[in-house]
Image (tube, grey):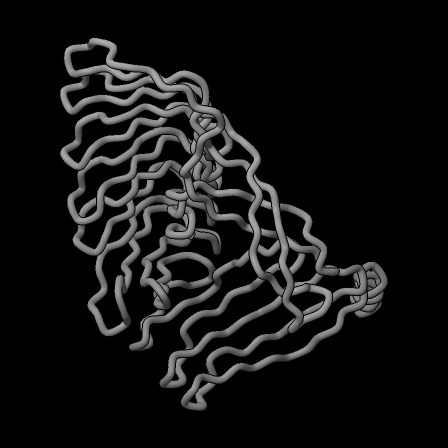
Amino acid sequence: MKATLLFSFLLFSLLSPAQKISYDTSRSDNGTIYWTGIHYRYTDGGGYDRWTFYYENGTKRLEEITDTSFRVHKLVNAWLQDGTQTLKNGNGIYVYSGTDSTIYRVKDSLYNGYAVSYYHFYEFRTPWKLWATGNYVNGLREGEWTFRDSSGHNDMLITFVNGKAYGQATFFYLFTGVKAESGFLDDCNRTGTWKNYDSLGNLSGEFNYVDGQKSGPCTLYYPDGKIKAKGQYVQVSRKFVQICEDPNNPGTFTKCSYRYAAPAKNGTWFFYDNSGNLTGTKKYHHETSESVSVQYYYNNKGKRTRVRTIGYDSDYCGKIW
């Protein structure tokens, strides 16, 4: 029996990659331990981390495992501040309290099921208010999620597939709950036909989007639903110039310019009165007043590798992550 055990141990040692263990600790501003970490690393590049987080009074808050190869967080055990254990061996409820306060249902160490999230909309001294509700499947948002503003009205309804904003979406005017826009999102980019509404909920326009920007036919409406104008948008190249820091020489600033696509009115536009009579036409050639935000991506050598342009009113992605 001992020989069998010894043989099994030796075989496991030979088949397992070499392992290096290190330890890490972080403290809160008041000097108490905030988290401790044990890092397991293999010579083949894999590994994982075991983390333990603490409340300021020194009691445990959370134990989790992070797979450093695949960036997967698995929750193991969690406690409320009074010591009540709400998550045991990867199953139960996890109450997160940070920039938001979310109640997660956890199954097999991953978020699974209905989640309710609360948020300090202005500063930490203001009360928590209901912010988002929806479902998780294996740690990722799935299906329709509802996001609210500080007044409690709907702010956004967004459909998720495997954690990405993909599907029907509706945005609302702040503090009123009146529908402002509706259409289809493809990984947070508007695509296809989007409908715009005025502050009273009347249809005001229909626009076609490609890769998050207006492109193709559009129609504007009077409050009673009659056509006000019809025309086309195209995406044109624009130059963006700013003062930026040289990534190869920190502290050195210079002019840098980039190209990006911006939506522009193009071709002949037709305008109508409320009775449907044509009142005039106007020809446009790549005329744009749309403002955009541009995101730049650099590799570890400081070379720009990618530019992503986001429409002026597409900051909702930043709100939901």
For this orientation, the residue located farthest to the bottom is: 31
The reply to whether residue 196 is visible in this rendering is: yes
User: Along the horizontal axis of the image, is 87 left or right of 297?
Assistant: left
| On-image quarter of the N terminus | bottom right
Query: Which residue: 44% across, 84% down?
Result: 28
Instruction: Name the one closer to the observer, 313 or 24.
Output: 313
Above or below: residue 281 compared with residue 136: above
Query: Which residue: 44% across, 41% down?
Result: 311
Query: Which residue: 28% across, 25% down?
Result: 205
User: Along the horizontal axis of the image, is 259 left or right of 47?
Assistant: left
Total number of numbered labels?
A: 0
Quarter of the figure with residue 250: bottom right
The reply to whether residue 1 is visible in this rendering is: no
Instruction: Name the one closer to the observer, 51 or 195.
Output: 195
Percent position (x, y) of residue 259?
60, 42
Instruction: Name the one closer to the observer, 261 or 7.
Output: 261
Quarter of the figure with residue 104: bottom left
Percent position (x, y) of residue 17?
80, 62
Query: Which residue: 47% across, 48% down?
Result: 293
Percent position (x, y) of residue 295?
54, 50
Above or below: residue 112 compared with residue 120: above
Instruction: Name the one closer to the observer, 232 or 53.
Output: 232
Quarter of the figure with residue 161: top left
